[in-house]
Structures are given as C-alpha cells and as structure tokens.
Image: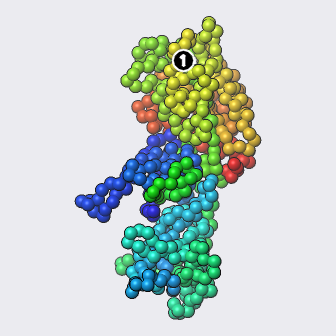
Amino acid sequence: RWCKIFYLTYEFGSLLNFCVDLVQGTDDENSKSIGVAHFEIGDILGSRNKTKVKRLRKGGCIFATIEQSTDEGSDGRVVFQLSALRLDCKQGMLSRSEPSTFFEIARQTSTPAGNKFVAVYRSQPVLESCRPCWDRAEIDMASFCNGDADRPLKASVFVHKKRGNHVLLGSFETTLNIMIEKAECRKTVSERDGYSSTSSGTYALQRPGNESNEPSGIIAVMEGCILLEKDSINVNGDYAAGCNSLRPPPIKTRLGSTGSVMSASSDYSEYGVDSPGSCTSVTVDMEALCISPSRASSVGSFGGLSSPRQSHHTFSDFVHAGLDVDLYVAIDFTSSNGDPRLPGTLHYRDEEGLNDYEETLVSVGKAISRYSASQEFSVWGFGAKYSGVVRHIFQLGADAVAKGIGGILDAYKSIFLTDLTMSGPTDITSVVKAASARAGRFEDGALRYGVLLVLTDGIVSDADATKTLLHAISDLPLTVLIVGIGAADFTVMGEIVEYSNSTSRRNVSFVSYREHQDDPRALSTAALKDIPDHIVEYFAGKGISHTAT
C-alpha cells in the first residue's frame, strides 16, 4: 500500500482519466513495468461503493475508491513525533540484533459497506531498536484527517522485513486532538522512563488476537500540534515557537462541505472479484469531487459535487449513500430537422462519425447513466407521423427500455427503418408527463431521482402550456434537461427555464449544443452543472437524509 496523496479538480460531465503504472526497481535503467491500470473519475464515482477494480495482466488488482474531502479546517499542517518506550518485538532465537520498526497512520473512511481505515502516512524504519524514536512527521491537515481533528485514526507499529512481509506488533486508535493532548502531557514528565502503560501521555499497543490484553508496547507522543499558514520558520528550518505552543483550540469540522478523496480497498468479495494470488492497492486523494466555494461560484455538477447554500448535505453524500438516477431520453423528429437522408440535416448519419443528436447522447447521456443502477433507459421520440397520425410521444426501439448508452444509440438508429414521417409541431408536454409519471412512482424516502433529457431542434409550439406543466411537476424528483440542437433561436427556451425556476423549485435546465459543438466535454459539463443542486435541494426539501437506504 502507498500513502502518497494526489489532489485533482473534477467537474461532472468532464472526462478525467488517470493511469496507475506499477514499476519494479528503484532506478530508470533497471526498472520495469509490472502492470498498468486506467481509471476514469466519473466511472468510479458512479460505481458501487464508489470503487473500481482493475485486474493486472501479470496478476493482482488495483482498487480505486473516491471519498469526499473538505476544505473546511484543512488550511494547517499537522506536526507530530512518536517514540516507543517499550516494544515486545523478540526476534528469532538465532538473531543477535533487535528488530527494525516503523509505524503507519490510517484515517477512518466511511463507505456503504462499513468503516475502513486508509493509510495516510508511513514512517521510515528505525534500525535495530526496541525503543525507537521515529522521525518527526509533517503532513497537511486535508491529507491527515480531511480537516476533522476528531476523525478516528489508527496507528500501527510493524517490524520491518526486507521482503515486504512486515509483522504487525500492535495498534491503537486515536484522533488528532487526542494526540495533541498527549503531547502536552509530556511536559509534566521529566524523563522518558517516567512513562508507563497507565500514563495519560502514552498509548498501549494492542496485538490482534491477544486475549490477555497485555500491551505489546508503549507509545508516547513526543510532539504534536497544528501549524497554521502564518506560523513562521526560522533560518535554521526550525519553527519559531515550540510546537505545542502553536496548538489552536480543538477543531471540530462538519464533513460534507467540499472536496473528495480517492482511496483504496482490499475486500475483493464485495466487488465480485475473485481473490488473486497477489493484490496491489492504490491510495489516491482527490480534492475534486467537490470544488471549494473559494474556487468556484457554483460547485454544482455530478463531478463538482455541490450542495445548496442552505443545506449541509452534498451530492457526494447522496451518491455515497446509494443514489440511483433514472434517465429518460426524448428526441425531436419534427420536420424542421430536415430530411435525414440528406447530408447536412440534423438527423443525417454516415459511417464516419456521429451526428449532433448522437454526440449529445454520448457525451451527456453517458455522464448521467453512470449513476443508474439498472442501466435501463426509456427512449422516446416526438413530433413525427405514423400512419398519417402525429405522435407527440412514441417508443424508439423494439423494447420498452434500452440497455446502456449503446442501447440508446441502437434504438435511435432503428427508428429510421420504420415508416416514420417527420412532422410537427414541437410539443414536449407528452414526454414530460411520461417522465413525471415514472418519477411519481418512486418509493417515498428512496434515494431515487429522474432526469429527462430532451433533445430538440426548435422552439416549443405552446410555451405557456409548457411553463404551466413544468411548474406543476416541480414537486417531483425530476429534472428536465433540454439540449437545443441546430441553429435555431432558443431565446424562448431560456425564458421557459427562467420562468419555471423562478416560480418553483429549480428543476429545469437548458443548454445549446451549438455553443459547445467542438468540445463534447464542455457540452456535458455545461448541460449537467445544475443537476446536483436540483437533486440535493429536492431531498433536503423533503427531509430525506443521505443516510437513507
């Protein structure tokens, strides 16, 4: 396991990949790659327990897990030093030396599968000593405890082995505030030998499976404090004041304000992966899934994990608790789209690329679909004639639902093999009513939410009726996301959205495809930036907690 932490900025709808390359060897000349794994942030965020597993070709797995982080209370740096007053670390009978030891600090991370400890710091080993004093450590607050000085931590002491099969001597649980308090207790003891297992300034190491409760060692906190940005350092590199004197009052932060963390897991069974002969875990921190308010005026986006200004809940909280998003797709087949057989028209398709409708389905639809448990989506059309009759809603594809984004694209393509005739008018009220009916059947208190993605090339024929309907459905767990395709003047669409959101809960968004046609990432980011706020505001307004199951 590694303890290196990385911070990334991520907004929902954008595509952000990272690669983990495992290298054996300590220098460039003799090192060789033993496995590579590629991850996409949005895929991890939308997966079970926000964890993705990648198998390596040469054996083993890499786990990547996203956890929310926070900027609140994270501006300082943690400085601490641990020392062992006694360790029960007997070597083999033939050994003439005392063992080398190191310690590891892990912070508690909450997942739907339960609490886990993720390593955030590992010391260098002290050679051949049963009374080691490990090097002074300094680590930023965000990485150490995510800005929460009362967050549970676990310290573990190991006997170092060259082959990596380190032996656990024992561990203890604590918090940053308690560590600082124990460092202050050290002032009252003049000699190290004055410490005992009952001293208020020490911890007793507990070995797993030790029924006698006899400690396997005594650990003292020699130094502990939180240094703020303003704390100065003198020319010798030492801190201008004693570390303990810089300790601020105990910090109690409320998790869920901003940020995200990516960490590791080693429980294979819950992800449906057989336990391999060897496993590799990766720990990555991401200050991304919730952007700090100081960095963005609105943190809203499935990847930007925002929350309403007056709610302590965040989108990340609800995703973490198992949020399930239903996606409904409605596509415009009115005559203003042009003859789909002619190049240059909006529905024209060729083998060399995607048309504007398909581009939107891939970039926007895929980003939303990551949060669907079933991966089954209703796909409808509107504005076309069948047997001479105008249909304001009809099913695309042979099945009632499409499986995945590929299924949506197949359903869209299949409609051109039917006797469909492009017609009009542009009336989206029927598809809005259909989506509303489905969202209205969600179980009370369930963490389910619907998104209706409407792709249209023109202005709705009855703006007043559309406004009235959108206002009427504002109490439902549903967002209507309209994407304007083509070069039409969509001013009226903007007026509909503004009216709907000003007279009721915000649940309608509009974006023009043409403004982002050269950048699919920008399109999905712009289209989805408000949806997390819609979701959080709905659940908060209904009193539905992110702890719901």
Q: Residue at x 57, y 21 (%)?
A: 397
Residue 203 image point, x, y percent: 58, 80
Q: Pick the residue in front: 474 or 316.
A: 316
**Residue 408 higher or lower than 388, as above or below:** below
What kind of residue is marked 1? Ile
Q: Residue at x 46, y 37 (%)?
A: 522
Considering every residue shown, the one lying at the far right of the view is: 444
For mark 1, what is the residue?
415
Considering every residue shown, the one lying at the far left of the view is: 29
Whether residue 464 appears in this view of the structure is no
Residue 466 appears left or right of 528: right
Q: Residue at x 62, y 7 (%)?
A: 387
**Residue 39 higher or lower than 360, as above or below:** below
The colouring scheme, among rainbow, by chain, secondary structure or one colour, is rainbow
Q: Residue at x 46, y 49 (%)?
A: 54
**Residue 226 higher or lower than 494, as above or below:** below
Q: Secondary structure at mark 1?
A: helix
Residue 200 appears left or right of 58: right
Task: Give the quadrant of residue 234.
Answer: bottom left
Residue 415 image point, x, y percent: 54, 17
Q: Pick the residue in front: 62 or 97.
A: 97
Q: Pick the residue in front: 55 or 296.
A: 55
Q: How many discs appear?
A: 1
Q: Pick the residue in front: 98 or 438.
A: 98
